[in-house]
Structures are given as C-alpha cells and as structure tokens.
Amino acid sequence: MTNTSEETQVYDSTTFWIAPARNFRTSARLHLQHLLFQNTLDHILEPNIQTFVAGRKELKVADLGCGNGAWLNDLYDELSSKGISAQLDGYDINPINFPASAFLPPSVTLKKLDILAKPLPADMVGAYDIVHARALTSIIVGSDLSPVLSAALALLKPGGWLQWEESRADTWVVQPPAPDVSTTACDTIAHMLKAAGQARGSGFEFLGELGRHVEEFGFSDVHSLSVNLRPRDLKAWTEDYLMVWEELYVFFPPKAEKPEAPMTREAWVDLFAKAVGETEKGVAIHQGAIVSVVGRKAI
Ligand SMILES: C[S@@+](CC[C@H](N)C(=O)[O-])C[C@H]1O[C@@H](n2cnc3c(N)ncnc32)[C@H](O)[C@@H]1O
C-alpha cells in the first residue's frame, strides 16, 4: 500500500527479500504465480527428470528460495502418487511465509537459509538428487549466475539434476485487447523497468540463453524449454505483475524531498493508477514465456 512519507529506498538484492514488506501479500502473489507457472509448463518435474525418478523408491529434493513451499507441496503429491518416498527440503532466507509444519506433509521441511552463503552447511553438500530453483532473477546481481549455479552444484549428488524455471524477465509485453485501447501508461512503466534493469547492469538478457550458461558452468545433458503463456491466463499474470508494480513506489522520492527527480513518488502513483485503468479496459502485461532449463551434475 502506498505511503508517501515512507523513506525512499534503493533496490538491494541482499535486503529486499528480508524486508517487513515481504509479508502475506507477497506470499499470496507467489501462490498465484505458482499456479500460473504450473498452468504454463504443465509439469512439476521436467520430462527428463521424470524419467530419472521413474522406478526409484527414495529421493532427496532441495528447493532453493522456496518462498511459501507451494512447489514442494505439489511435488509431494506427484511423487506420492508414483509410490516414491522423498525427503523434500525447502530453503529460504526469509521464513515468514513458510506454512506451519503442522500443515505440511511430513516429508516436507522448510528451513531458513541464505543459499548464497559460503560454505553451505556440510550435511547438505552432495546430498540431493534434484535441486529446484524458480523465480530467482531478483537475487542475481549484474547477470552473474555463478552464485546460484555454484549453490545448486554443491548440493547435488554426482548425476543429480538441476531444474531451473524463470519468467522471461528480460521481456515486457504490453498487449491491448484491440488496437484502439490505450497502453500509454503500461508502456511507460514497462520501458522504465527495462531501463532500470539495464542501469543496474542486467536487463536479464541471460534468460534468452539460460541453457548455454548452465552448460558452460559444467552441467551436462542440458535441456531447455520455452513455453508461451496461455492467453486465458494473461489476466491473472497481469494481476500478479500489478501487485509487484504497486510496491515499487518506495524507490521513488516524494516530491517534497526531491522535486527535481525525473519520477517523484506522486508521479509514480499517478502513472500506476493510469496503468491499472488501462488493464481494466483489458490491457494485458506479461513476460511472454517461461524458460525452463535442466542439467546434470557430472557423475
Ligand atoms: C520471487 S520469490 C520465488 C519463490 C519460489 N521460488 C517460487 O517460485 O514460488 C524469491 C524467493 O527467494 C528468496 N530468497 C532471496 N534471496 C535468497 C537467498 N540468498 N537465499 C535463500 N532464499 C532467498 C526470497 O525470500 C523469496 O522467497
């Protein structure tokens, strides 16, 4: 919710996710985003990993930056239905959105951990058959994928699989339902976000070649998928992104504090309201596709 007296912030990937604002609203948005990823990909485990798990009786899976554990909960159902008993461990730097363990399946455990910390706890190293990562672009600084890929590689057993899924955060699509519906405010925000990413040293262009990066890091059997979003999900994707955009006001200074700023908080709030108005006329905002990359740690 907009608070014009709140201090102006500078985006910092190391503090953003532990701020008090990452609360039940963030979790609700992540639940929605989880459903949208699943609608788009139509699998919990990527087909090559499904082949890997077929016939196995036991499995250990880690989910890095697991949020509210929604993916692990669905994975539990899928593996149980195949008679696979698995230890499913979620790790997140901020435990605020973990469901109470009383409401989780007994084999799902969520733990507070900075997955970029070095060294990682010794009992986790080389312990996992599958490591999952999803929607982690916000913790990647300057297009350097090595912190996330090093963590995944460290946790995997030899021959274990990484599954990494991301929205194409390098792309903003502003799509009117008909040519005469205005998209000016949404276009302006999309353009600003792209420019802000590039100014920080990453417009997330690496997502277009995520498979190549994973392969160059030393993973083998790399497979990449790019799946376009379903038109019938675009309204929900739009709502998901509006919830993110609504929180961005903290990065713009109030007019009283910095009247010469290229975008004051008041101007942002006005622009956001106009963008919402456009979406109420049917404009969709989204990122076009989801990219999913899997690869194996050398045996
Ligand atoms: C966009 S959310 C994605 C959550 C989940 N992967 C999903 O797809 O629903 C990013 C998550 O990464 C977590 N995170 C950020 N930095 C982290 C770090 N260094 N170690 C562990 N988790 C981190 C955040 O707290 C947040 O829950």
Image: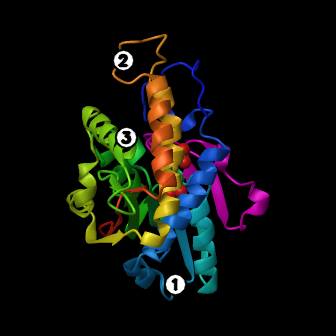
**Compared with residue 54, is residue 6 higher up or lower down, i.e. above or below?**
above
User: Residue 54 appears at what percent x and percent y?
Assistant: 48, 86
| Label 3 SS | helix
Other residues around mark 3 within 10 Å, as few (<14) / some (14–19) / many (≥20): some
Instruction: Give SS at disc 2.
Output: loop
To which residue does mark 1 refer?
56
Q: Residue at x 30, y 53 (%)?
A: 171
Badge count: 3
Q: CA distance from mark 2 to mark 3?
A: 16 Å
**Relative to 264, is 83 above or below?**
below
Residue on which the image places disc 3: 189
Callout in the foreground (3, 1): 3
The residue closer to the viewer here, 44 or 40, is 40
In the picture, which quadrant includes the N terminus? Answer: top right
Residue 214 in view, yes or no: yes
In the picture, residue 160 is in which quadrant?
Answer: bottom left
Comparing marks 1 and 2, which lies closer to the viewer? Answer: 2
Q: Residue at x 41, y 43 (%)?
A: 138
Tell me where residue 297 sits by quadrant. bottom left
The residue labelled by disc 2 is 261
For residue 4, which quarter of the picture?
Answer: top right
| Residue range (magenta) | 91-120
